[in-house]
Image (spheres, rainbow, N blue to C red):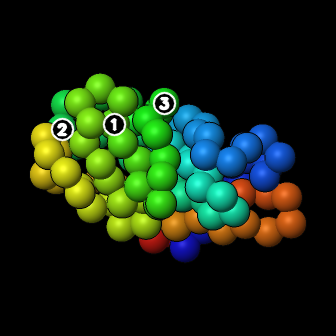
């Protein structure tokens, strides 16, 4: 698995998000406290952006229809979404955040 540096830790404050485009994937990089998560940028319910949704206890809530997703597993936790969203491995070293795409 190849990790790609996408941001510096200093670019994200607690409970904020950053849109990333990497190898054709649109990804939402999220921070919850000292943890970082990378998930699909779009909700599985209506393909609307998750960016701007609230982040609480490793979950993100879609700002449009209220669907909740586990940031670790991508699992849909509440309707109207039933399908999971993609998640991507994240690695933090020093001040750099890296995301892995695929299995290359």
Between residue 86 and residue 100, name the one nearer to us: 86
* Separation of marks 2 and 1 at Cα, in angstroms: 9 Å
The answer to whether residue 15 is visible is yes
Residue receiving disc 1: 62
Q: Position of residue 71 (x, y in %)?
A: 43, 59
With 12 as the anchor, is 16 left or right in this view?
left
Disc ID at residue 45: 2
Disc ID at residue 31: none
Between residue 81 and residue 86, name the one nearer to us: 81
Mark sitting earlier along the chain (2/3):
2
Secondary structure of the residue carrying tag 3 is loop
Q: Position of residue 12 (x, y in %)?
A: 72, 43
Outermost residue, right side: 94
Mark sitting earlier along the chain (3/1):
3
Residue receiving disc 3: 52
The answer to whether residue 20 is visible is no
Around disc 1, counting alpha carbons within 10 Å, would you say few (fewer than 14), some (14 to 19), or many (20 or more)? many
Q: Position of residue 72 (x, y in %)?
A: 43, 66
């Amino acid at each position: 698995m190849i990790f790609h540096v996408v941001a510096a830790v200093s670019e994200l404050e607690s409970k904020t998000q950053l849109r990333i485009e990497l190898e054709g994937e649109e990804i939402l990089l999220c921070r919850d406290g000292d943890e970082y998560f990378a998930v699909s940028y779009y909700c599985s319910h209506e393909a609307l952006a998750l960016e701007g949704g609230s982040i609480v206890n490793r979950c993100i809530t879609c700002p449009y229809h209220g669907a909740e997703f586990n940031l670790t597993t991508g699992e849909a936790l509440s309707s109207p979404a039933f399908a999971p969203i993609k998640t991507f491995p994240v690695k933090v070293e020093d001040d750099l955040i890296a995301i892995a795409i695929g299995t290359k």
